[in-house]
Amino acid sequence: MNAVLVGVFLVAAVVIAWIVAGPALAARRRARHRAAPLGEADRMYLRRRVPLYAAMPAELQRRLEGLVNVFLAEKEFVGCRGLTVTRPMQLSIAAQACLLVLGRDEHVYDSLRSLLVYPSQFLVREAWHDEDGIVTEEERFLSGQAWDVSRIVLSWEDITGRSGGDEAYNVVIHEFAHYLDHEGGGMDGTPALGRRDERARWAAVFQAEFDALRDAVDRDEETLLDPYAAEDEAEFFAVASEAFFEAPVRLRERHPALYGQLQGYYRLDPAAWAG
Ligand SMILES: [Zn+2]
């Protein structure tokens, strides 16, 4: 056997070993992170700054801590416009993001690589073609954007400034709900659901609730869900998810069918934590 052939075999062997062992090693690493509890300083910070963590049962708190450990180990935080993303900031973002997968358990945003964090709202330039090939450009200030499944952009001011108030506003939950929607294939307000009958039930409830919200917004009525949810189905799912975690008792009271669908999907019952 000549040297070139030996070289080819060696490279092939390394590639095969990497393909076989890589996922197993990653899974072991992840299991280790999941099992490790957070330190007392981290817990104290979460209790103070993430009210939902403080409210949930101890068993869920432990599970959330494991997910936060995985999230912090696997995702990169990138401070933008000179911002330094400190450990408490990372904890706060990770804990709120992991709420959405706390009951679902199987994934921790597997394709997500980076969180880009701006000090405040950031300017996004968007351009699109219509059917006649005319390009329209628009500039908008955003507080968050689920760019694709590998990157999410957030404004720190909007994470701290408006959450925890009376409004059911939470930009982290909003953007991570978009992420789950992306994962479900397309951005149509339907995350990955299991059986066909579950999908049919989801579609029926969501369509009825979305239509009712649009009518209410048209009539200028007061709504529990932010009127922005009437924009399209994707925004409706993201805003409904915010209300599910931030105003669960009121959502269950006023929109029991919607609450029921979200409870089934997230496999959590945050209205029961409020007692
Ligand atoms: Zn949105």
Image (spheres, grey):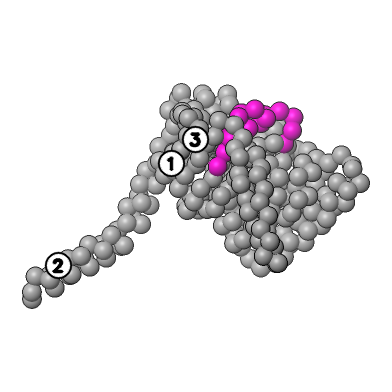
Instruction: Give the secondary structure at mark 2.
Output: helix
Q: Nearer the viewer, residue 146 or 28?
A: 146
Within 10 Å of disc 1 (Cα), the crowding (few <14, some 14-19, many 20+) is some
Quadrant assignment for the C terminus: top right
Calculate the distance from the C-alpha at mark 3 to the C-alpha at mark 2: 44 Å
Instruction: Give the secondary structure at mark 3.
Output: loop
The reply, left or right, for residue 163 in relation to residue 30 is: right
Q: Give percent across and percent down for residue 200.
A: 72, 65
Q: Nearer the viewer, residue 114 or 165?
A: 114
Calculate the distance from the C-alpha at mark 1 to the C-alpha at mark 3: 13 Å
Q: Looking at the rendering, which quadrant does residue 188 occupy?
A: bottom right
Instruction: Give the secondary structure at mark 1.
Output: strand
Q: Residue at x 36, y 57 (%)?
A: 23
Closest to the camera, between mark 3 and mark 2, is 3
Q: Looking at the rendering, which quadrant does residue 40 occupy?
A: top left
Within 10 Å of disc 2 (Cα), the crowding (few <14, some 14-19, many 20+) is few
Q: Which span of residues is magenta-colored?
A: 153-168
Residue 198 can be seen in this image: no
Q: Residue at x 72, y 59 (%)?
A: 202
Residue under label 2, please give it.
7
The reply, left or right, for residue 219 in relation to residue 258 is: right
Q: Give percent across and percent down for residue 158.
A: 63, 32
Calculate the distance from the C-alpha at mark 1 to the C-alpha at mark 2: 36 Å
Residue under label 1, please give it.
76
Can you tell me whether the CB of the residue at mark 2 lies under 8 Å from the nearest atom of ligand 1?
no
Q: Amino acid at mark 2?
A: Gly
Residue under label 3, please give it.
80
